[in-house]
Image: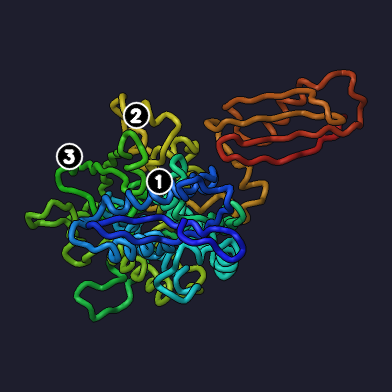
């Protein structure tokens, strides 16, 4: 306590002593005469707790600095500044830098785009944590409403940065709260748009690869790069461009490429390791781009493109140039590298009778048995055989895509093979009369015929029954009716 105010209350100060000098930091707390003891010290429990927490914070800040040569005024200035509003922008940049140091450079780029977009919306590169109220965040998200993915992706990234800052700056056990607001419980983050299916038909695939490349005056024409890399993607079981870029010589032997899928290797116990046998059809392309220097990398993409992002962008530009100048497609129908990964998966399932599990394995997706993958030496032969079937189907036949392009049509939903798990259920007035769940069915009528054999005699003739058929592997279902004869 220093002085009594005219209203009878005392303003509470925190005394700071340093190098034999004393100064005071004014708080926003006051007490009346009952809140001080006979020695003029605060005895109000609530105010004492507040001051104790402040003193603990001040002590933490000073312990991080060499203050032996400071005078008391410099100490006071530092403590006041150190407990003022924190800068979200500065923290976000450090968060991103740490992600890069930890080997997450690709994800770090998304985080950078997210907080930079927020800064442009607010109008400053020094966004403070106090700026980020639920109202401001909601308005920012609304400004992203016309985007397909950013409206979900950017807020999720900013929220993650904010949550980590709360852990770093706030000591809830000790009562030291430097970030006093948290807008996120009141903020609703929208879902990103469901992407349009990127796969193309086998006929369109052939048209792309057999199209004459457009003229170019460049030493390394982009359409040629796009064409060749698209061929590698399609013929190497949908391998990602990032994995081609970082493929290493030491993992290529006996015509087999081994790699860790960079997108998921840090999240999987088996480091997303995969091996694929190179089909003969793309060996000339492999030879064309092999790195003959002392570099650790298998392909010479590093010599031409300084970063993976540059490589991927140029591949997609080359692919788009073929779509625009040769195939004369509309802009919204242009292909990309992902088109050929999705096409591999679609042809594998729809044309080569592969199950979803087999497709996932071939694409090196995470699986519920991934723990076992850390103990078992995996046999990748099934993926190689499936890949050969896809290559054979596209490049060595004239077969047409059998699935209807209308994905909701009956012929596409229920074009299944005997290897797929099918469930059929027979209903009458909402009651289940019969059910089957098995592999071995080749078409709809086989399932319906099996169910109708189990129809009870008690159902009147010329009554209608309902049949629901589910393709468990595709996660699809459709209902049918039959009239009892």
Residue 143, label in figure = none
Residue 339 to residue 252: above or below: below
> Which residue position holds label 3?
254
The CA span between labels 3 and 1 is 21 Å
Q: Nearer the viewer, residue 404 or 140?
A: 140
Residue 231 visible to the viewer:
no
Residue 455 to residue 334: above or below: above
Q: Nearer the viewer, residue 314 or 20?
A: 20
Q: Tell me if mark 1 has few (under 14), some (14-19) or many (20+) residues whose alpha carbon lies within 10 angstroms of its own.
A: many
> Which residue position holds label 2?
373
Quadrant where the image shows the C terminus = top right
Q: Quadrant of residue 111?
A: bottom left
Left or right of residue 93: residue 473: right
> Which residue position holds label 1?
390
Q: Residue at x 43, y 34 (%)?
A: 367
The CA span between labels 2 and 1 is 25 Å
Query: Of all residues shown, which one is farthest toward the front?
Result: 38
Q: Earlier in the sequence, mark 3 or mark 1?
A: 3
**Percent of width and height locating residue 63:** 26, 50
Foreground mark, 3 or 2, reads: 2
Exactly how many numbered labels are in the figure? 3
Q: Residue at x 40, y 70 (%)?
A: 126
């Amino acid at each position: 306590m220093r002085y009594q105010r005219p209203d009878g209350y005392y303003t509470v100060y925190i005394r700071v002593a340093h190098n034999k000098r004393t100064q005071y930091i004014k708080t926003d707390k006051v007490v009346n005469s009952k809140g001080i003891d006979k020695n003029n010290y605060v005895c109000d429990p609530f105010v004492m707790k507040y001051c104790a927490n402040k003193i603990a914070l001040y002590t933490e800040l000073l312990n991080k600095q060499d203050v032996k040569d400071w005078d008391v005024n410099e100490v006071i200035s530092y403590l006041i500044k150190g407990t003022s509003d924190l800068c979200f922008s500065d923290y976000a940049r450090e968060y991103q830098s740490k992600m890069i140091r930890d080997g997450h450079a690709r994800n770090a780029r998304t985080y950078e785009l997210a907080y930079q977009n927020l800064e442009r919306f607010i109008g400053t590169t020094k966004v403070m944590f106090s700026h980020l109220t639920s109202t401001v965040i909601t308005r920012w998200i609304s400004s992203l409403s016309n985007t397909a993915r950013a409206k979900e992706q950017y807020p999720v990234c900013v929220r993650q940065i904010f949550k980590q800052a709360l852990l770093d700056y706030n000591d809830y056990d000790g009562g030291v709260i430097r970030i006093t607001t948290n807008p996120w419980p009141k903020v609703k983050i929208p879902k990103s748009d469901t992407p349009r299916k990127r796969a193309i038909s086998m006929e369109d695939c052939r048209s792309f690869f057999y199209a004459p490349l457009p003229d170019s005056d460049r030493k390394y024409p982009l359409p040629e790069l796009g064409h060749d890399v698209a061929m590698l993607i399609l013929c190497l079981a949908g391998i990602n461009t990032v994995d081609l870029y970082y493929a290493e010589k030491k993992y290529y032997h006996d015509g087999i490429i081994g790699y860790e899928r960079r997108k998921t290797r840090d999240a999987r116990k088996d480091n997303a390791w995969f091996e694929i046998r190179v089909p003969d059809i793309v060996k000339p392309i492999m030879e064309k781009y092999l790195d003959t220097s002392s570099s650790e990398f298998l392909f010479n993409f590093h010599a031409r493109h300084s970063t993976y992002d540059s490589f991927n962008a140029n591949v997609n530009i080359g692919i788009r140039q073929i779509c625009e100048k040769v195939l004369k497609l509309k802009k919204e129908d242009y292909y990309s590298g992902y088109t050929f990964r999705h096409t591999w998966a679609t042809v594998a399932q729809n044309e080569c009778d592969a199950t979803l599990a087999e497709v996932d394995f071939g694409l090196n997706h995470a699986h519920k048995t991934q723990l076992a993958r850390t103990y078992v030496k995996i046999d990748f032969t099934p993926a190689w055989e499936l890949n050969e079937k896809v290559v054979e189907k596209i490049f060595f036949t004239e077969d047409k895509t059998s699935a209807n392009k209308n994905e909701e049509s009956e012929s596409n939903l229920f074009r299944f093979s005997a290897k797929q798990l099918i469930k059929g259920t027979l209903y009458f007035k909402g009651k289940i009369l019969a059910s089957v769940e098995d592999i071995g069915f080749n078409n709809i009528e086989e399932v319906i015929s099996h169910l109708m054999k189990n129809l009870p005699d008690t159902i009147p003739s010329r009554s209608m029954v309902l049949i629901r058929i589910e393709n468990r592997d595709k996660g699809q279902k459709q209902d049918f009716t039959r009239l009892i004869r």
